[in-house]
Amino acid sequence: MQQSNKSTTFLKAAIPYGGIADIAKAAGVSRFTAMRVLQGKSKNRRVLRALASYLQELKQDQDTITATAEQIIH
């Protein structure tokens, strides 16, 4: 359980302001439930799937921003 808590704490830190509400909405649960998952106190599968999807979209957005910045620089 200790490793799980470290992993979820790391993921929680990667989520920008307002992201927990977005994840909760996508999972169809309350923000409280989503927060419990991110604290490692619950393993709600809907929240975990929504979290994975959210982080994947966030990475794609960051990749797009990086590529655009590189085009501007070069």
Image (tube, grey):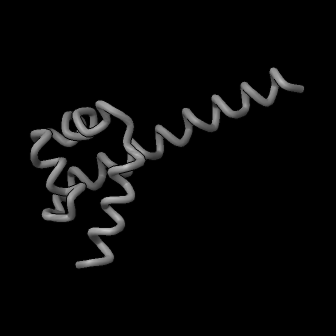
Relative height, residue 72 to residue 20 (above, below): above
Relative height, residue 43 to residue 36 (above, below): below
Relative height, residue 11 to residue 1 (above, below): above
Q: Is residue 57 left or right of residue 23?
A: right
66, 51: nearer the viewer: 66
Instruction: Residue 3: name its quadrant.
Output: bottom left
Q: Quadrant of the C terminus?
A: top right
Q: Is residue 74 left or right of residue 33?
A: right
Q: Residue at x 20, y 34 (%)?
A: 25
Q: Residue at x 20, y 42 (%)?
A: 27
Q: Position of residue 33 (x, y in %)?
A: 11, 48
Q: Quadrant of the N terminus?
A: bottom left
Instruction: Residue 21: name its quadrant.
Output: top left
Q: Residue at x 84, y 25 (%)?
A: 73
Q: Position of residue 39 (x, y in %)?
A: 21, 59
Q: Residue at x 42, y 47 (%)?
A: 14
63, 26: nearer the viewer: 63
Instruction: Residue 2: name its quadrant.
Output: bottom left
Q: Position of residue 36 (x, y in %)?
A: 14, 55
> What is the total number of numbered labels drawn onto the structure image?
0
Relative height, residue 3 to residue 57 (above, below): below
Q: Is residue 26 left or right of residue 69?
A: left
45, 34: nearer the viewer: 34
Q: Position of residue 71 (x, y in %)?
A: 81, 25
Query: Please, which residue is most extreme toward the top here?
Result: 72
Query: Please, which residue is most extreme toward the right here?
Result: 74
